[in-house]
Amino acid sequence: MNFTGNLKNKNCTTMFYNLSKSHNEKYYFRVENSGFKGTAVCDSLQIKVRDSPWSPTIEVSGKQTETEVVTITCSAVTPCPHAPPQLTWDLHQGTAHITETNGTFTTKITQNITLTDAHDGLMIKCNAAYPVSGGFKMADSKVTLSVSYGPKNSSVEVSPSGSLSAGQSVTLSCSSRAKPPVHHFTWFRHSSQGPANVSQGHTYSFNLTEEGQYYCVASNTLGNGTSPDIHLRINDPAGFPWYAILSAGRGRTLCSFLDYKIKIMDQGNRTAAGNRRIALCQCFSIETQKRRSMKAEEQGCN
């Protein structure tokens, strides 16, 4: 024990060293002078000695949303300002400082962070090392950030995958990573007049009649996320594009063209070639009837 104050300056500071559980007592201030003793019995001080140190406190000030700047503070109770605890944490190690509030001392370190979606779920750990006789006593605390952000990594999946045929049913699915979760999906198709809104919802199902480029836009309360374009291509069973077939011209010329291609590919299997030729011409007939009235026999499919 050491008296460091100066009574003339009304400073009666007393320093205790090597505290132990035996110091758990109530203390009074007394003035003694030439046999005179005066004790402040109405103003006592209770000292409680802990075996374990105080755990530090981690605070995050500000809204935990991407692009926001927050201040993260780790603080620890400092019963002895002359031997404060040493604070360390997972963030950039700044300079610790001691503050006093109503006679209570606290050691703090702070760090400002501009939040991104990568900080969501980040666990921050702060350690406090209290110096004691023969070494340190350790304590720590942890906090996990919960950062909100707009849609990220939006993408489109096609079902079925692989080669697609004209008239086939296709389903496009949109996915995106967001917090809060995506609450709205919008589908677009590129056209000569620009992007055209074709559907709403997590999936978009339709019968494929022509090639095109599609993409989705995922939205939540914090923003939008656009997927890369996906190009849907149409191929017929013989391996040449359907869009070429559907734009070949008059039915008679078209069927002759198909017949020639199929015979070569089937290497003389005329029965199979003929059946495939009829199916292709009938399919084409459905498309051409939208534009003109032609009889099936005029297309050479019989």
Image (cartoon, rainbow, N blue to C red):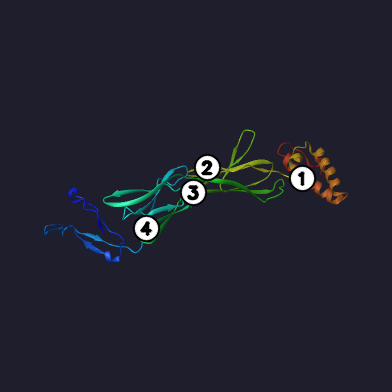
Query: Mark 3 or 1 closer to N-term?
Result: 3
Separation of marks 2 and 1 at Cα, in angstroms: 44 Å
Q: Residue at x 33, y 51 (%)?
A: 106
Q: Amino acid at mark 1?
A: Gln
The answer to which of 237 and 175 lies nearer the viewer is 175
Q: Residues within 10 Å of mark 2 (few under 14, many from 20)?
A: some
Q: Which residue is mark 1?
A: 282
- The spot of residue 23 in percent (x, y) is 27, 64
Q: Nearer the viewer, residue 197 or 167?
A: 197
The amino acid marked with disc number 3 is His
Circle nearer the N terminus (4, 2): 4
Q: Residues within 10 Å of mark 1 (few under 14, many from 20)?
A: some
Q: Reading the chain from its start, which is encountered first: label 4 or label 1?
A: 4
Q: Which residue is mark 4?
A: 131
Q: Amino acid at mark 4?
A: Pro
Q: Which residue has dot 2 on it?
A: 224
Q: CA distance from mark 4 to mark 2?
A: 52 Å
Q: Earlier in the sequence, mark 2 or mark 1?
A: 2
